[in-house]
Amino acid sequence: MAWRELGKKGIRASLTTDLTSRLRRHGFTSVSTVDDIIKSMSAAVRCTPDPSFMSRRFDFYEALTKESLIRCYHASPELFARKGNDESFGLKTPKKEKFVKRDSKAQPPVEAPYVPPKPQRTTKPISDKTIEIFEGMTVVELAKRTCESISTLQGILTNVGEKVDTEFDPLSMDVAELIAMEVGINIKRLHSNEGSEILPRPPVVTVMGHVDHGKTSLLDALRQTSVAAKEAGGITQHLGAFVVGMTSGASITFLDTPGHAAFSAMRARGAAVTDIVVLVVAADDGVMPQTLEAMAHAKAANVPIVVAINKCDKPAANPERIRIQLASEGLMLEDMGGDVQVVEVSAMKKTGLDNLEEALLLQAEIMDLKARIDGPAHAYVVEARLDKGKGPSVTAIVKGGTLLCGQYVVVGSEWGRIRAIRDMAEKLVEKARPAMPVEIEGLKGLPRAGDDIIVVESEERARMLSAGRKKKFERDRLIKIVEERASEEQDKKLSVGSKKKFEKDRHMKIIDERAEAEQPEESEEEPKRVEVPIIVKADVQGTVQAVTDALLNLNSPQVFVNVVHVGVGPISQSDLDMAQACGACIIGFNIKTPPSSVSLAAARASVKIMLHRVIYHLLEDIGNFIVDKAPGTPETKVAGEAEVLSIFELKGRSKSKGPDVKIAGCRVIDGFVTKSGILRLLRSGEVVFEGSCESLKREKQDVDTVKKGNECGLVIQNYDDFRVGDMVQCLEQVIRKPKFVSSESGAARIEC
């Protein structure tokens, strides 16, 4: 019966197939032999022979299979009786799932070639990466330095209108810069001297030091002029360049830098373009903050230093003390085994100038200064200003090559054609050679001080370079603003989180210590910060930057100085309109008085205009203006003190007047006592009670204030336990304003 059940389930066919494969695997390759064995076994099962025969058959079967498949055939009848139980035979039935109707609209598969995704390059320029470019570099070399593919650079070349046949064709520095700007990488130009005429050039010497140590006076003594007497306030506030013919016949280019703390950027620019730094130190004053700053600028630019100890003719002069101070600051002097020359001079008596000249020429000879004469010029902007008759005018020093009149130049992000070249005596010249300071006219816009001047071959190339630099500058500026805002928001979130945590811990501590006390507020009010918008106008680009930096240093927790606009030149109507729109004040430094129409319009619009010619007066005026705008910090102050001399008690008062009252008879010994103030009662120097004043009388008259030396009677609300000898302090809430502080070096700040 078991085999019949198996046949019903379809097991017989599978068993036959399995036995056939296993018999052939064991050597029964003949088809007839396999069929005979299967038939004999089937007949034996059908005939149901004796048990011995069945055992022999099944032993033979086990010998063939050598596996435990017989358990399927010896299963209990109860398992076979279960209908639909296919899992008993090793068959897994699929689980029934919910029927889902298929979409009848069959869509054929879309056959499309695989396109790998293009690597997305961020639009943010890699501001911290700078590559060096040179004349004649190939596309392959530029691709290696920019980490871009050759095809990408060739596409950029096509967009800028350049035709390059192969990737090994040489490129000019202008084209290489255009490509680098497109991929967002900063560049540094390397000017090669191969094939050019190299000749000795005069040294460029920068005079640096602390304010009022005699830098300009020393230059006046060297060049036989009196520039210091013409300076506003008697101090130098501009970066000047001069060519001085020495008594030995040699010529030296001098740069005069301001010594005031606000002109740090000017000193840094002077150190960047110079060959030798003359560090002027007053013999009667010593090493000051700007002296140390000048030393730091010279060391950062890797420029040798020659120390000039000035004012040695004064009675209080002590040159040895200056040497010790300089040595203690890390300056290795020749007198102490170093290589820094020290010269004692006097600008007023004109002594020691020959020794200074000898020291400078010796240092220049050691450095073996040379430069290429032919080829396109490379110059450095020392100062830039806007002249009413000439337009944008640039003071520059040529580093290499020859600058010719009529050439197209790119200065920073501005461009133009040189209309005129003037020397420092304002005489027209046709060309400028290395180490020669000149004034250039003909630019389309005003560049920034510190920009490089490069000569290009055509007007089209100048326009393209200028447009590319402006685009990159604006992109970098916007990215910097976004990064600053993101960092401010992150800092604000962190500060808010830490503040909440601190407040939570403080609240928990208060609750634990004083369970019955009232809960304090969740957060304290943040201190208010007032914004002061300012517009800066100055005579030259360098002073604009100096005044702007000095104003930004006046920022405090209460006042935020926002320089909304800067410019070079006189105050115009557009500046007034901008100031009126944003509520700003206008600062004019070393410029002409605005026209009467602008002054009247400013008075009608309530726009404040501050004009100054000396940086000290400017910082002091704007500092006081910022202090007035600051909201201040509220604090409690002791306005006066009174001593209790006697005690009076009023009894038997009517119900309308209230219960009995104790009055303290006092004499004011310091300051004044007011009825609106808070009174603090002190006994033996300890605070006994603090409350408001309920009544204050003098000679039976109600008064609001009692001054020093007068007697009065007072009643403190909810307190009557007075004793003779107690002290009563009158407290008042005052607003403490910030304080403007200016040091001797000129550094100004706001202290809150």
Image (cartoon, helix red, strand yellow):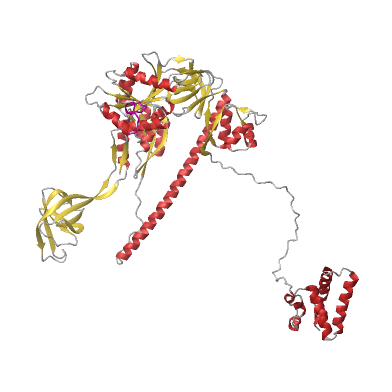
Q: Quadrant of the C terminus?
A: top left
Q: Residue at x 89, y 75 (%)?
A: 36
Residue name at image x 56 percent, y 42 percent: 122
Front position in the image: 227 or 26 = 26
Instruction: Determine whether 600 is above or below 107 in the image.
Output: above
Residue 226 shows up from this direction: no
> How many numbered discs, if any?
0
Q: Nearer the viewer, residue 24 or 624?
A: 24
Please provide percent x and percent y for residue 696: 15, 55
Rendering coords of residue 4 (x, y %): 82, 81
Residue 150 appears in which quarter of the rendering? top right
Residue 268 image position (x, y, % from top left): 40, 30
Q: Is residue 184 visible?
A: yes
For image coordinates 79% across by 73% down, the residue present is 65
* Residue situated furthest right in the rendering: 32
Q: Choose between 86 and 618: the one closer to the eye.
A: 86
Whether residue 451 is in magenta: the answer is no
Q: Which residues are magenta?
A: 329-340
Q: Look at the image and say whether residue 334 sits in the magenta stretch.
A: yes
Which residue is at the front of the view, 299 or 97?
299
Q: Main secondary structure of the magenta part?
A: loop
Q: Note whether 322 is above or below 402 in the view shown.
A: below
Measured as percent of width and height from the top left, residue 623 is found at 31, 37
